[in-house]
Amino acid sequence: MAKLVHPDGEKAIARGCQNKGIIQCVSTNASFPIEDIVSSLSPTPNTPPPLFFQLYVSKTRSNSEALLRQVWSLGIRTIFLTVDSPLAGKREADERVRMDDEQQGIPMMTGVGKPVNDKRGGGLGRITGSFIDEGLDWSDLPWLRRHWKGRIVLKGIMCAEDASRAADEGLDGIVLRCVILLFLIMSPFSFFYLLTPS
């Protein structure tokens, strides 16, 4: 959705990150297809793109499977499986914000639709979360592993039990839910933790 603030959106972010040696995590909700973001980078022969991919699992699993194949074919080897957004929140302030003419109709990688103004506002929040599988749980990991052979980081856990379970399930890393980070800002605790050695 970075195209909402700049015409080059995630492509500009990818180039800036590459120039500074930073890895970018591209969201399923990006405003450009992943192949466009990868192709915007400077070529680096025999080096994978400096990208991770943030996966929101679709209710239509075949859509997520196709997206994972595409991401893999581009050389990306780590996904962040997002589990802290099973349902879109009721964001009344966001709903009231009307999109300007340039923002209306911006396609998203998910292909779920293009936001347009209606009587309730811009509708971006409603569109971006409408495809997410709210029933995703631990039992879906075998499905994911059948369709992804790279590293899997679990993004959005909220308790120690989930961290322990992630380690038991053999996941490669965890990221605490963003709201929890507010309480950890003054702490030396690292919110990103690799569960297995590189």
Image (tube, rainbow, N blue to C red):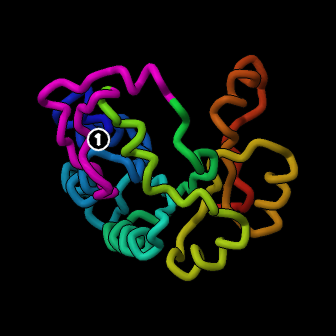
Q: How many marks?
A: 1
Percent x, y for residue 116?
23, 37
| Residue 56 position (above or below residue 187) | below
Q: Quadrant of residue 64?
A: bottom left
Left or right: where 161 falls relative to 2:
right
Numbered disc 1: secondary structure = helix
In the picture, which quadrant includes the C terminus?
bottom right
The residue lying at 42 percent from left, 76 percent from top is 62
Which segment did they paint magenta?
91-120
* Residue that label 1 marks: 10
Percent x, y for residue 149?
53, 76
Magenta-drawn stretch, dominant element (helix, strand or loop):
loop
Percent x, y for residue 97?
33, 21
| Residue 194 position (above or below residue 125) | below
Along the line of sight, the residue nearer the viewer: 50 or 107 = 107
Taking the view exactly as shown, the residue that stands out farthest to the left is 101
Taking the view exactly as shown, the residue that stands out farthest to the front is 119
In the picture, which quadrant includes the N terminus?
top left
Under mark 1, the amino acid is Glu
Q: Quadrant of residue 146?
A: bottom right
Q: Residues within 10 Å of mark 1 (few under 14, many from 20)?
A: many
